[in-house]
Image (cartoon, rainbow, N blue to C red):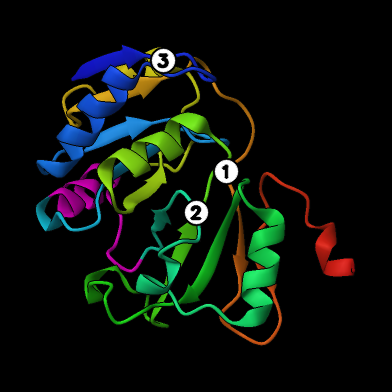
Amino acid sequence: MEFYELHPENPQIRFIKKAADVLSNGGVIIYPTDTVYGLGCDIFEKDALERIFLIKNEAHTKLLSFIIPDFKNISQYAKVSDMAFKLMKKLTPGPYTFVLPAAREVPKKLWTKRKTVGIRIPDCKVTRMLVEELGHPIISTSVTNRKGEIYFDPEEIKRFFNPHVDLMLSIGALSGKPSTIIDLSGEEPEIIREGAGEINFLAV
């Protein structure tokens, strides 16, 4: 596994480009977000997606996040109501994953049984630069062991995942909770998982 340490506020672009190249060539990487480290691949690389399911020992029905840098092309991946768009604009970039109806362009293998997808715009410069360099979304899930316990320390992550992934971008130890998951596929927002980020917007 290639391993690169980045400055969180002024990331070295050469390392971002290396990671984007690995993704576009069907690789699997670990990278930082504004909550925990993510395990990800290119949305269009089916073999890489299979590797992620094998690494995590998870069923194909699990909701995976689409990491995007902004709302510019969101209609390619999800159907967004006026209510959903207003709330997402208010909460992003930030530690939230939004469950939305999947758009037709999204490979059906990435849909949940309810034909939804998870959309995420992290408040992390490294993440957004990486997705912008790649040019389309990264499919992502939290870096955990097979018991679902989150790894925060890059050295621990490196020891466990070294045989399984191609590259890791590190900004040091992270701490906290995974993203809050908000279901916006219905008429009203619903909290599916309370994690990082305020949820008092529901009381407004």
Per the image, the residue denoted by label 1 is 178
**Disc 1 versus disc 3: distance between alpha carbons?**
21 Å
- Residue located 43% across and 19% down the image: 11
Task: Answer few, some or many: residues within 10 Å of disc 3's Cα (few below 14, many 20 plus, some between 14 and 19).
Answer: some
Residue extending farthest front: 72
Q: Where is residue 45 in the image (x, y as percent from the top left)?
A: 14, 54
**Which amino acid type is marked by label 2?**
Asp
Range covered by the magenta-colored residues: 48-61
Reply above or below: 42 against 89.
above
**Which amino acid type is marked by label 1?**
Pro
**Disc 2 versus disc 1: distance between alpha carbons?**
20 Å
Task: Answer few, some or many: residues within 10 Å of disc 1's Cα (few below 14, many 20 plus, some between 14 and 19).
Answer: many
In terms of secondary structure, where does tag 1 sit? loop
| Image quadrant in which you'd find residue 134 | top left
Reply above or below: 82 against 130.
below
Viewer-side residue, 13 vs 77: 13
Asked whether residue 144 appears in the rendered view, the answer is no
Instruction: Check if mark 1's residue and mark 3's residue have beta carbons within 8 Å.
Output: no
In terms of secondary structure, where does tag 3 sit? loop
How many labels, in total?
3
**Which amino acid type is marked by label 3?**
Leu
Q: Can you tell which mark lies on residue 70?
A: 2
Q: Does the magenta stretch include residue 109?
A: no
Per the image, the residue denoted by label 3 is 6
Disc nearer the start of the sequence (1/3):
3
Q: Is residue 56 magenta?
A: yes
Disc nearer the start of the sequence (2/1):
2
Asked whether residue 142 appears in the rendered view, the answer is yes
Reply above or below: 117 against 103.
above
Instruction: Check if mark 2's residue and mark 1's residue have beta carbons within 8 Å.
Output: no
| Image quadrant in which you'd find residue 66 | bottom left
**Horizontal relation, residue 129 to residue 179: left or right:** left
